[in-house]
Amino acid sequence: MGMTTSDDASVYKISEDLALVQTLDFFTPVLDDPYLYGQIAAANSLSDVYAMGGEPKLAMNIACFPKDLPKDIIRQILKGGRDKVKEANALVIGGHTVEDEEPKFGLSVTGFIHPKDVVTNCNAKAGDLLILTKPLGLGILNTGIKAGLVSEDGYNRAVSTMTQLNKFSKDAMMKVGVNSCTDVTGFGLLGHAFEMAEGSDVTIRFFSSSIPIIEEALSLARMGIIPAGAYRNMDHIKDHVKISDKAAQEVIDCMSDPQTSGGLLISVEKSKAEDLLNELKNSPTPYGLVGEVTERQDYRIIVE
């Protein structure tokens, strides 16, 4: 697996029973707290390996710091990343740092998987049901946090969602067996679903009233507190999306909202969907059955 289907990570077969999963991700701070920023950046980087069904094993730091940034802040960022990698039962084995005007941090992550167990973003089947394992609204909340418009509860919900590893959800889907998966990050739910639909040559229908969204993000969206990336995401796929008049605009805004360390969008056979939902009952984050897969229609994505 590689770039041809816009999958979440590359997969290189080493032997008949072992394949290497490789990914890289980093970004600028989303919060002022350096330790939490390090955790979020690491969880986001690790997520791509989980989306493929793999287990992260090794990570290398990628960091850019201003030369006048206090060393304690740098230590806290790196510590946050290290602690999150440790939580994933993986190791930080080094990395590389350069000077830059704005801090940037993330990881190059290596994981492993059996070649027969690889889960791609391009194998969704007509008749599948779609399950989302984290609530939406993180980009909107981060925009609101920067503007000082988010309550303490909203802040805590955003942080707990972004710092949560997708390991629990990955283990659940691998136990049940699923057809396809992608993690929901910078392109938003609609953007990543479009990649899944296009790669699988199907249409994805979302039930807008069933999508888990952090409540305060909906309030902010109604106020127009929406990151520019959400508009870019929608503009990129607008010709392939049909939106019902019944779908609330604030929900659509959250569906195109770029997510930081978002959840997994899983396509699973209808006969296995209940088993997967049962496995997710003790999930550390809200989740939901959010749609279905149909034969290809005129639009790649339909939102009802």
Image (spheres, rainbow, N blue to C red):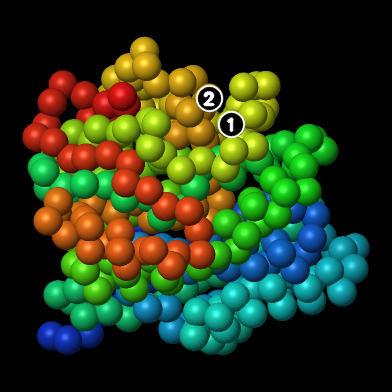
Mark 2 nearby-residue class (10 Å; few <14, some 14–19, many ≥20): some
Q: Relative to 297, is 149 on the left or the right?
A: right
**Residue occupying image coordinates x 53% and y 86%:** 91
- Could you say which quadrant of the image residue 94 lies in? bottom right
Q: Relative to 293, is 283 on the left or the right?
A: right
Residue type at numbered disc 2? Glu
Mark 1 nearby-residue class (10 Å; few <14, some 14–19, many ≥20): many
Figure check: 173 above or below 287: below
Q: Which residue is mark 1?
A: 218
Q: Can residue 191 be seen?
A: no
Q: Nearer the viewer, residue 242 or 59?
A: 242
Helix or strand or loop: what does disc 2 sit on? helix
Helix or strand or loop: what does disc 1 sit on? helix
**Residue occupying image coordinates x 14% and y 75%:** 116
Figure check: 71 above or below 275: below
Residue 114 percent location from the top left of the image:
21, 80
Q: Nearer the viewer, residue 54 or 28?
A: 54
Figure check: 210 above or below 89: above
**Residue occupying image coordinates x 32% and y 17%:** 244
Q: Relative to 194, is 234 on the left or the right?
A: right
For the image, the number of numbered tags is 2
Q: Can residue 206 be seen?
A: yes
Q: Nearer the viewer, residue 191 or 12?
A: 191
Q: CA distance from mark 2 to mark 1?
A: 6 Å
Residue 258 percent location from the top left of the image:
52, 40
Figure check: 263 above or below 77: above
Residue type at numbered disc 1? Leu
| Cβ–Cβ under 8 Å for marks 2 and 1 | yes
Ranked by sequence position, the earlier of labels 2 and 1 is: 1
Residue 44 percent location from the top left of the image:
53, 61
Residue 250 has which mark? 2
